[in-house]
Amino acid sequence: MASSLLFVHSPLVGPSSWARVAKVARDARGGRVTVPDLTGIASMRQEWTDWYVTAAARAATPRSGEVVVVGHSGAGVFLPAIAAELGARATIFVDAVVPPGDGPHHTSPALAELLDRQTDAGLLRPWLDWWPDDVVERLLPDGADRAALRADMPRLPRAFYDEPVAVPDGWTDRPNCYVQLSPAYDDDRRRAHEWGWPVSAFDGTHLSVITDPGRVFAAIVDVVEQIARPT
């Protein structure tokens, strides 16, 4: 694996979501591991995509083709643009949204309806508050983990999800991989498989990045190494 890893968190949560996987990566591989804080997106009122992509790319060390970009959940929409900005060695979608092969990504009607229900005075409620307590406790059984995730969780403008997100031409032909953690991302994993990407899946939850970081990192290593294997 490349010595430089850039872990990109979903816009709906903060960098704490990647903290444990990043620690496993540092302990196992050494080298440069970066988890940028992109929660400043919540203070923007327009041009969200440009800000998010630029802030993530600027955080990479070094800013070169040896970077592997790894994104979780809603960060997937922005990964092609971040990877193109960096000339990344590979891009890893971890239980993440896979955008279209060409043309802009748009929020689906089903997600838009959910977002509307979670909006108060133009701002989305904190992501953990979207779900019943029993669901949150199943995802994060440890109360300290729930508190840590909540502590850096931004409140995004609802309009953030109305902005189309463009993807670079030919991005699906670059080295991309998919790691599925939960059944909610079956469709995204299938799309990745249809495009011929290396895919890894295990029976976890969307927040296995917090509860099972060693296993998540092992799956990331596996799909990256698949890229280099002869076919």
Image: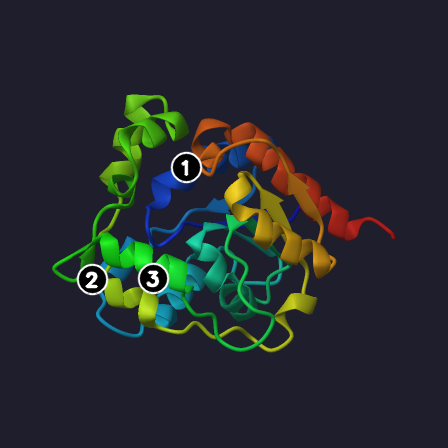
Q: Indicate whether 61 appears above or below 87.
A: above
**Residue plotted at (56% across, 35% down):** 216
The kind of residue tagged 1 is: Ala
Q: Indicate whether 224 appears above or below 182.
A: below
The answer to whether mark 3 and mark 2 are in CB contact below 8 A is: no
How far, Cα to Cα, is label 1 from label 2?
A: 23 Å
Question: Observer-nearest residue: 205 or 223?
Answer: 205
Q: Secondary structure at mark 2?
A: helix
Question: Observer-nearest residue: 154 or 123?
Answer: 123
Q: Which residue is mark 3?
A: 112
Q: Which residue is mark 2?
A: 43
Residue mark closest to the camera, 3 vs 1: 3
Which comes before the other along the chain, label 3 or label 1? 1
Quick check: 178 left or right of 130? right
User: Residue 164: x, y in percent?
Assistant: 40, 74
Q: Which residue is mark 1?
A: 19
The answer to whether mark 3 and mark 1 are in CB contact below 8 A is: no
User: Residue 32: x, y in percent?
Assistant: 52, 46
Residue mark closest to the camera, 3 vs 2: 3
Q: Residues within 10 Å of mark 3 (few under 14, many from 20)?
A: some
How far, Cα to Cα, is label 3 from label 2?
A: 21 Å
